[in-house]
Image (cartoon, grey):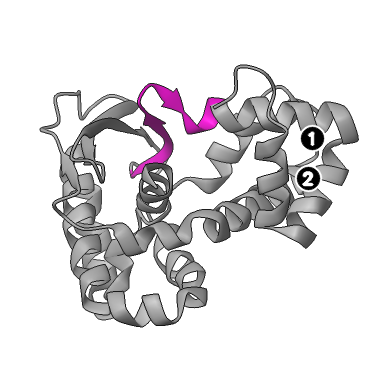
Amino acid sequence: MLRRLVFATALSLGTLALLPLQAQAQSAAASAQNPGQLMQSISSQLAAAVDGHRQLYKAHPEQLPGLVDSILLPHFDVDYAAILVLGMHAREATPEQRSRFAKAFYNSLTHRYADGLLNFSSNRMKVLPFTGDANARRAVVRSQATLDNGKTAEVDFVFHKTASGDWKAYDVILEGISYITNYRNQVDAQIRKEGLDALIHSLETQGDDALKQMEGNKPAGGQ
């Protein structure tokens, strides 16, 4: 359950866009925030948005991927994360392959973990004070997630500064396990087994089912 909660939170880093009439003003404000402030603002607004529609999404969970689609892109660097997941295979891939993989992988993750949003609330995710350098190109925002048994788990959100000066997240580290590294190992194994085009086709046509199969076939040492 924690994995679903954390990945759903990561996939929903664009929550500010839930308020369309204020989206442009919020985007400008977000650019002026350091990663810690941005994450805190997103977490608070995410909790408010989910609390206001929790019963609706419980009754219609099929709408959750659409919700994630509408709120993700402003604050999560899908293309950069996909390149890191591809690892050395990114250098061999064509621009079209990289683009298709990024879209298909993101869509698969969205459908795989979107229902974790139903468990999100402000008292389950505590964003810790930001101690990094806001002028750096990379920053880590640390947080703590509360489990069902009352224990806490360490969750780090990794941001980088884009060429336009915006902070965007690209990795989530759960109890020391990086989302990027975890899936890079699994993707590498699948590409070596069936090739990049076949993997992309599976993700495009089977979505989260292909992702589940890939997770089930993860190499030794995977999480």
Report the amino acid beneath label 2.
Gln
Image vertical order of residue 162 relative to residue 119, above or below: above
Residue 171 part of the magenta-drawn span? yes
Asked if labels 1 and 2 touch by Cβ distance under 8 angstroms, the answer is yes
Quarter of the figure that contains the C terminus: top right
Label 2: which secondary element: helix
Q: What residue range appears in magenta?
A: 166-181
Residue 180 point in image, percent of width and height: 53, 31
Q: How far apart are marks 2 and 1 (CA)?
A: 6 Å
Residue at figure coordinates x 46%, y 74% from the top left: 61
* Residue, disc 1: 93
Quadrant position of residue 164? top left
Relative to 196, 49 lies left or right: left
Say the numbered circle drawn on residue 97: 2
Report the amino acid beneath label 1.
Ala
Mark yes or no: residue 33 visible.
Answer: no
Residue 156 point in image, percent of width and height: 31, 31
Residue at figure coordinates x 40%, y 53% from the top left: 8
Relative to 111, 216 lies left or right: right
Residue at figure coordinates x 21%, y 34% from the top left: 152
Label 1: which secondary element: loop
